[in-house]
């Protein structure tokens, strides 16, 4: 975040704190600065009202811009080598994992999300499986094949994988073509 | 930045300058030579410039060229089946060798960004007619 945006956030939070204290003071029946009079009466105080409005409106605009301008850094897996970095997009790892899982017998559909952590990769896999299968065995096969394949292809160890069977397809395979 | 021209070395008859674009093209060609690289992955700007003119040879390459050194970022798509660390290291070595050999610049960094994996259409193996009797 840029220093200017940090400054805006600090000023905004201080203004919010001042307003909170002001309203708390009103609750307690105290208004030492006589601000309620400025807000409610006194047309000669229009200049103050205009200044107040301008400040708050600018703060509002800057806060909105800060909120909307946040760039998401692309998800990548980073390898350090002697000659520089090798950055692998997580989407590429996901597509490789998906390909490996799709080849496993009994998996009808699959979705994969990968998270890169400091010591390896963590996968979340959701599958739709074919019926009449031993699910614990299928899940174990997915986990071991995924870990082996990713370590072999990407060169980074898989530190964990969660496999969720979201659905068991009820389609029956035609016995004849 | 591609397009900028940096001074490279001085000869007694004058100064030889190499455009960043040239270093980018050398790097791009050296990277795509490597077995397992399906192609370079350009951003939106590269895509638009490809629409407007012929194919860019420095697509997916960002170079920083100083007077004696160069740093390269390569955005590549890998072929399915290739082992990524091996391909990446080969890209780094090939690009470094090509730039240093052709320009005399010292390559201090080659960062490889694997942007995707290209899956080729798998050809179905020809079905052999099985004998019905042994």
Image: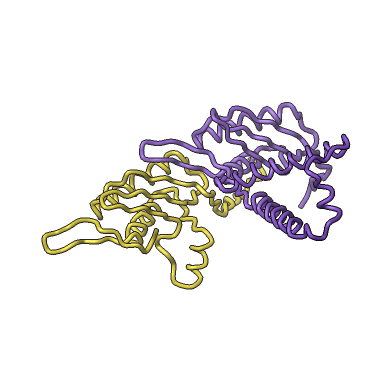
**Residue located at (59% from left, 27% from top):** A159
- Residue A67 versus residue A100 in the image, above or below: below
Q: Is residue B99 left or right of residue A18?
A: left
Q: Where does the image place residue A86, in percent across and percent down from the top left?
A: 45, 41
Q: Specify the quadrant of the image occupied by residue A52.
A: bottom right
**Residue located at (51% from left, 70% from top):** B51
Q: Is residue B41 left or right of residue A24?
A: left
- Going by the picture, which residue comes out furthest to the left? B12
**Residue located at (40% from left, 60% from top):** B58
Q: Specify the quadrant of the image occupied by residue A114.
A: top right
Q: Is residue A66 left or right of residue A81?
A: right
Q: In front: A51, or B18?
A: A51
Q: Is residue B53 left or right of residue A99?
A: left
Chain B colour as displayed = yellow
Q: Where does the image place residue B128, in percent across and percent down from the top left?
A: 59, 49
Chain A colour as displayed = purple
Q: In front: B60, or A18?
A: A18
- Going by the picture, which residue comes out furthest to the bottom? B52
Count of numbered circles on the image:
0
**Residue located at (63% from left, 28% from top):** A160
In which quadrant will I find the N terminus of chain A? Answer: top right
Color encoding of the figure: by chain
Q: Where does the image place residue A147, in percent across and percent down from the top left?
A: 58, 31
Q: In front: A97, or B91?
A: B91
Q: Where does the image place residue B122, in percent across and percent down from the top left?
A: 57, 52
């Amino acid at each position: 975040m840029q220093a200017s945006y940090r400054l805006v956030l600090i000023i905004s939070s201080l203004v919010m704190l001042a307003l909170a204290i002001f309203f708390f003071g009103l609750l307690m029946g105290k208004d030492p600065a006589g601000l309620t009079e400025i807000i409610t009466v006194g047309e000669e105080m229009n200049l103050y009202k205009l200044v107040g409005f301008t400040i708050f409106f600018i703060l509002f605009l800057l806060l909105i811009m800060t909120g909307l301008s946040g760039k998401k850094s692309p998800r990548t897996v980073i390898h350090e080598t002697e000659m520089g970095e090798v950055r692998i997009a997580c989407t590429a790892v996901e597509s490789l994992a998906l390909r490996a899982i799709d080849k496993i017998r009994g998996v009808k559909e699959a979705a994969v999300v990968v998270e890169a952590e400091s010591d390896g990769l963590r996968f979340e896999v959701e599958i739709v499986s074919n019926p009449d299968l031993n699910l614990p065995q299928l899940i174990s096969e997915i986990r071991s094949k995924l870990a082996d394949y990713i370590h072999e292809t990407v060169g980074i160890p898989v530190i964990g994988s969660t496999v969720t069977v979201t659905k068991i397809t009820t389609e029956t395979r035609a016995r004849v073509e | 930045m591609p397009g900028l021209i940096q001074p490279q070395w001085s000869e007694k008859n004058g100064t030889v300058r190499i455009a960043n674009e040239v270093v980018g093209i050398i790097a791009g060609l050296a990277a795509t030579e490597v077995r397992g690289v399906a192609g370079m992955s350009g951003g939106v700007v590269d895509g638009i410039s490809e629409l407007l003119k012929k194919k860019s040879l420095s697509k997916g390459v960002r170079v920083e060229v100083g007077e004696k050194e160069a740093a390269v970022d390569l955005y590549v798509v890998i072929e399915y089946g290739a082992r990524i660390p091996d391909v990446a290291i080969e890209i780094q070595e090939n690009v470094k060798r090509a730039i240093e050999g052709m320009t005399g610049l010292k390559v201090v960094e080659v960062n490889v960004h694997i942007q995707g994996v290209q899956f080729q259409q798998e050809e179905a193996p020809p079905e052999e007619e099985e004998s019905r009797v042994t």
